[in-house]
């Protein structure tokens, strides 16, 4: 298995992966929207896990100069429990640390205990925070999930 920075040739595999992992996701998380947006800012932090050239996992990371963030962590259900998410997150952390990032944040949907347990096993802590958001621009008025 290889962890690589996103390349355009990965698009179809990512689209299939995200549809399989999160078929009811919000439109702004679609590959057609999310990938071009990410490629305009820190494209080297969009990571893809490849097995024999096929996309089996992804994560997007970002650093705002104060905190790092992880988004769209996804692994094909048929490839879970093989360390793919761990390797993606370790590489994202390595790249964020190289940028001087002191802390990584992520959000998990309430009730996703499998994800919470994965992140806890990797040293993430549940913090007492209230997550708030506001849609702007073309997604104003859409649900905040």
Image (tube, grey):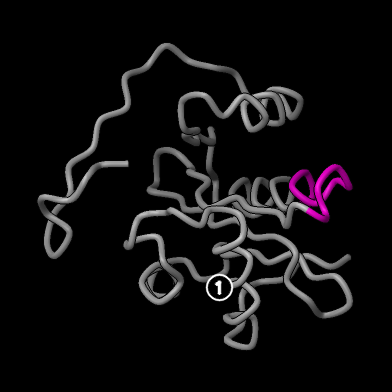
Quadrant for the C terminus, please: top left
Quadrant of res 128: top left
Q: Is residue 38 left or right of residue 89?
A: left
- The residue drawn where x is 82% and y is 80% is 53
Secondary structure of the residue carrying numbered label 1: helix
- The residue drawn where x is 64% and y is 64% is 47
Quadrant for the N terminus, please: bottom right
- The residue drawn where x is 85% and y is 70% is 51
Q: Residues within 10 Å of mark 1 (few under 14, many from 20)?
A: some
Q: Is residue 67 magenta?
A: no
Pick whichever, 33 or 101, lies toward us. Answer: 33
Q: Is residue 55 left or right of residue 46?
A: right
Quadrant of res 10: bottom right
At which x and y percent is residue 86? Answer: 77, 43
In the rendered image, the vertical position of residue 1 relative to residue 77, given as above or below: below
- The residue drawn where x is 77% and y is 65% is 3
Pick whichever, 67 or 119, lies toward us. Answer: 119
Q: Residue furthest bottom?
A: 9
Q: Is residue 127 left or right of residue 59?
A: left
User: What kind of secondary structure does the magenta stretch mostly adopt?
Assistant: helix
Start and end of the magenta stretch?
A: 78-87
Pick whichever, 44 or 12, lies toward us. Answer: 12
At which x and y percent is residue 6? Answer: 61, 75
In the rendered image, the vertical position of residue 11 relative to residue 64, given as above or below: below
């Amino acid at each position: 298995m290889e962890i690589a920075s996103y390349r355009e040739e990965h698009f179809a595999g990512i689209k299939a992966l995200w549809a399989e992992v999160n078929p009811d996701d919000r439109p702004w998380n679609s590959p057609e929207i999310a990938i071009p947006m990410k490629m305009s800012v820190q494209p080297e932090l969009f990571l893809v896990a490849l097995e024999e050239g096929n996309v089996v996992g992804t994560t997007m990371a970002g650093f705002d100069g104060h905190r790092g963030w992880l988004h769209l962590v996804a692994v094909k259900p048929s490839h879970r429990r093989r360390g793919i998410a761990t390797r993606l997150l370790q590489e994202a952390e390595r790249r964020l640390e190289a940028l001087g990032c002191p802390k990584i944040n992520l959000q998990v949907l309430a009730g996703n205990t499998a994800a919470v347990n994965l992140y806890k096993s990797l040293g993430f802590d549940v913090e007492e925070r209230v997550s708030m958001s506001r849609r702007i621009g073309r997604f104003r008025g859409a649900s905040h999930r």
